[in-house]
Amino acid sequence: MGENMRLSLRTRPREVPSSVGIVHLGIGAFHRAHQAVYTEDAGDGWGICGITQRSATVAEQLGPQDGLYSVLERGPGEPSARIIGAVREVLTGDATVERIADPAVKVISLTVTEKGYRHDPATGRLRREDPEISLDLTGRSPRTVIGRLVRGLARRDAPVTVLCCDNLTANGEALRALVEEFCERSGTRIGCEVAFPSTMVDRIVPSTTPEDLDEAERLLGVRDEGVVVTEPFTQWVIEDTFAAGRPAWDAAGAIFTGDVAPYEKMKLRLLNGSHSMLAYLGSHHTYVADAVAELGDAVRRYMDEDAGPTLDVPLGFDLEAYKSSLLERFANPALRHRTAQIAMDGSQKLPQRLLGVVRDRLAAGAEPRWAALAVAAWMRHVKTARELDDPMADLLRMTVARADTPGQVVDGLLSITDVFGPDLRESKVFRDLLVEHLGGLL
């Protein structure tokens, strides 16, 4: 199909927001399949300015398409595609500070992944040794997410809400703490009112394939280079503490609550923890659906025996039905969610997804056998993977390079306090479980 039939306002005329009220940092596939869809469905004319953090790919995809893109849903039946018009601009990271400072902007949202915050997952503080953070603290034109966010907020007078949508425990408070630490260390003052609500986001969004582009073209009749693929399920729970206006996301199905923590813990420990377990134990499978066909019983036992007892279930919430629904979602073969995609950045993900479960079960006097199996599978991944896609890859590789036995691998990795903190290496119960499991996996 020629360029004349590429998705744009000319080939698919429609109403789009006339102004921008949201700046979103990290406009990757997840944001476009989740928060942007809620913003579109709210129907009250809020436009989004998306900021790319690393790559200009999304800008190159959406620029010629007037910001339009499609969401391809793959479920048990026939796939469907719809066009989203909420994104009105896609800019590179250099534009972040100026856009955040715009008083017309009421919400600054983020999906930059765990590693994008350049923090120590065990302590929640900025990494002291991070060279980019150190340079931003000197006052140069900022290049990190936190540096750019602080610089933009410091130039504002109007109130604004900063909405973290990444998988961090108590993500609103976690981001507030990083902003405050950066301000303290850099001598920066933020004079405007800033709210940091916590959120829980849930939708599985695998990488888009050439086949997905072709499928969307068949369904839409135009070529879209910015297709995002996802499942039918979506959920968004938001703490209702905003400093300025917001879209009517509740009208689009978002849940506003005074306490996100129970939902967040369920999602991180059940969905994300199980995902990591499947990715590392099932690394010999390309796709999650194939991994869960083999390992579904182990995942269910992790949910029932380890993660489940650590949760504070919201009143009226059917936990058993939720656990069953997760296994059904994982088993969706149409998504083609790659285990390698989930396995990335494990050092940043384990503390939120699995190690909290380990600590809570140990504190209760229980053996976290299934959570330890998942952590041991990560340790095997660190030891044996040909390519280790992780911001701590060099340290991890160096730690296990001369470790010849399961015990040596376990002791070396447990000594990395940026991942495991100072406490878990002192637990004989946890160490023995890891050595036992790793011995069976290597």
Image (cartoon, rainbow, N blue to C red):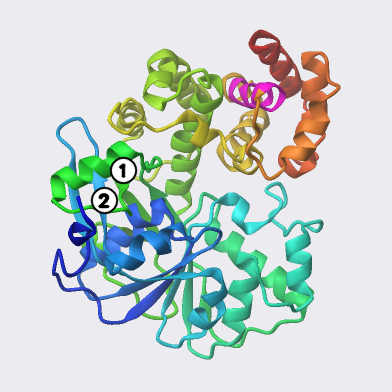
The image quadrant of residue 136 is bottom right
The image quadrant of residue 244 is bottom left
Say which quadrant the C terminus sits in: top right
C-alpha separation, residue under disc 1 versus residue under disc 2: 7 Å
Residue 274 rendering spot, x and y as whole percentages = 48, 30
Residue contact at pointers 1 and 2, CB within 8 angstroms: yes
Residue 325 rendering spot, x and y as whole percentages = 30, 31
Task: Kindly state the secondary structure of the residue where label 1 is placed.
Answer: strand
Rendered position, 382 above or below 408? below
What amino acid type should be assigned to the residue bearing mark 1? Thr
26 left or right, relative to 181: left
- What residue sits right under mark 1 in the picture? 230
- The residue under the point 46% across, 19% down is 285
- The residue under the point 67% across, 73% down is 142
Range drawn in magenta: 373-384
Residue 237 rendering spot, x and y as whole percentages = 37, 55
